[in-house]
Image (cartoon, grey):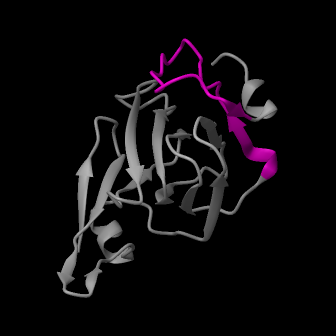
């Protein structure tokens, strides 16, 4: 089983595995198409990605793909700790331009379901962080978009200023 917890942002969920434990350790379900469909979520995951980050203070984001190749993401942190941030960019949504942050780590094993139309990014809270993404759409570079991590239109509260951020992520314009 998986435990789906709604966030304050419409259609976004924190997902926690339900652990079956014994003296050897535990077993837990990390993905179930049937459970995703039961919650009305996009269960068409077509690609998996890994991102490795060497140092704490690395910021990646805020990224999304525009139509017609918008993607839903299922994000988890396999090693280390991240401060994971999503922004609802859907103009018709009741939570348009709102953001929320979540701590995902190898210890808490939480996953974050990011719906289509959301920007996503994260800040590493430890060295040697590995993030695993499952996405509902193949990557289309012509549809890649982003918003600036420090854009005042959103007012995201980051744990601290990043020590490492790509030039591309620094150059996104105002929303």
Quadrant location of residue 98?
A: top left
Viewer-closest of 113 and 101? 101
Q: Main secondary structure of the magenta part?
A: loop
**Rendered position, 130 above or below 63:** below
Q: Taking 118 as reference, is 112 left or right?
A: left
**Rendered position, 152 above or below 55:** above
Q: Position of residue 15 (x, y in %)?
A: 31, 58
Residue drawn 65% across and 45% down? 67
**Rendered position, 68 above or below 138:** above
Which image quarter holds the C terminus? top right
Residue drawn 53% across and 41% down? 117
Which image quarter holds the N terminus? bottom left
Viewer-closest of 160 and 11? 160
Q: Position of residue 128 (x, y in %)?
A: 59, 54
Residue drawn 51% across and 55% down? 73
- Residue interval drawn in magenta: 141-165
**Rendered position, 49 above or below 72:** below
Q: Would you say residue 96 sits in the magenta stretch? A: no
Q: Taking 55 as reference, is 101 left or right?
A: left
Quadrant location of residue 35?
A: bottom left
Q: Taking 167 as reference, is 42 left or right?
A: left
Can you name the residue that lies furthest to the top here? 152
Q: How many marks?
A: 0
Q: Position of residue 28 (x, y in %)?
A: 29, 77
Q: Would you say residue 156 sits in the magenta stretch? A: yes
Q: Position of residue 138 (x, y in %)?
A: 69, 63
């Amino acid at each position: 089983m998986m435990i789906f917890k709604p966030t304050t942002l419409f259609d976004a969920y924190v997902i926690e595995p339900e652990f079956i434990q014994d003296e050897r350790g535990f077993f837990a379900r990390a993905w179930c198409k049937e459970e995703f469909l039961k919650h009305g979520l996009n269960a068409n995951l077509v690609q998996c990605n890994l991102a490795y980050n060497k140092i704490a203070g690395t910021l990646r984001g805020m990224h999304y793909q525009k139509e017609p190749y918008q993607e839903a993401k299922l994000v988890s942190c396999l090693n280390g700790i991240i401060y994971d941030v999503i922004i609802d960019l859907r103009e018709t949504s009741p939570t348009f331009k709102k953001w929320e942050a979540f701590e995902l780590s190898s210890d808490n094993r939480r996953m974050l379901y990011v719906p289509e139309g959301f920007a996503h990014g994260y800040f590493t809270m430890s060295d040697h962080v590995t993030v695993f993404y499952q996405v509902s759409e193949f990557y289309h570079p012509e549809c890649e978009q982003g918003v600036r991590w420090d854009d005042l239109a959103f007012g995201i509260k980051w744990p601290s200023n990043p020590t490492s951020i790509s030039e591309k992520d620094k150059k996104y314009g105002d929303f």
